[in-house]
Amino acid sequence: REPTGFDIYGSIQIREREQGGENDLQDGGSRIGTKAFWQIRQHDYYVFGRYEAGFNVLSNLESRSEPGEETGQIRNSFFTRLAYVGMDAPLGYLVLGKNWSTYYAVAGLTDRFSGTGGSASGTYNAQTDGGPTGTGRAGNVLQSKLSLEFLPHKLFKPFQLNFQVQQGNSI
């Protein structure tokens, strides 16, 4: 990393999916966001933060093209995907907010199945983004990662132990 940094990013994503023998265009996770990090001490100590909003392109277009639809639906199609602050140090990091869950380190590989027509891993359960249950983009979490290099790092990656504590939410 550089000593300090600030990025603004975005993408528009639309996918074609076959369901029931018919092809259909669907929203695919469009987003816009910003992230920043600042070096606070030498030897890789950083403070960082990120905010990312998601939005639906096709549902916005449909609501504008259909007469009689309320414009409030357009505003409601923007939602928070990620919003967190944290500190990164040589032995690990600490994060507070809405962030990818510790479970997502594995589920991130298998959640792509739902986008390609297969069954997903339960990352985005209960018709949510996994925020209330802590499996996807977990909301109101405190996360910590401890990273230890007790094996030769040229042969093995560091051992990492992830912790996640989340305020309970009923789903």
Image (cartoon, rainbow, N blue to C red):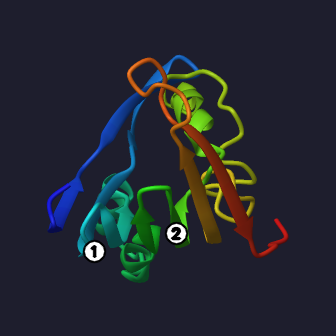
What whole-number distance in Å separates the C-alpha atoms at marks 1 and 2? 18 Å
- For the N terminus, the quadrant is bottom left
Residue 56 to residue 122: above or below: below
118 or 41, nearer to the observer: 41
Q: Which residue is mark 1?
A: 41
State how many labels appear: 2
Q: Residue at x 51, y 35 (%)?
A: 158
| Coordinates of residue 98 in the picture (x, y in percent) | 54, 69
Q: Which mark is residue 95?
A: 2
Residue density around tag 1, few if under 14, some if 14–19, many if 20 or more, within 10 Å: few
Q: Secondary structure at mark 2?
A: strand
Kindly identify the amino acid type of the residue bearing the numbered disc 1.
Arg
- Residue at image coords 44%, 17%: 155
Q: Position of residue 64 (x, y in %)?
A: 29, 68
Q: Tell me: residue 155, above or below residue 129.
A: above
Q: Nearer the viewer, residue 81 or 96?
A: 96
Which corner quadrant holds the C terminus?
bottom right
Residue 67 in view, yes or no: yes
Residue placed most toward the observer, 122 or 86: 86
Q: Amino acid at mark 2?
A: Val
Residue at image point 66% right, 45% down? 103
Label pair 1/2, CB-CB below 8 angstroms = no
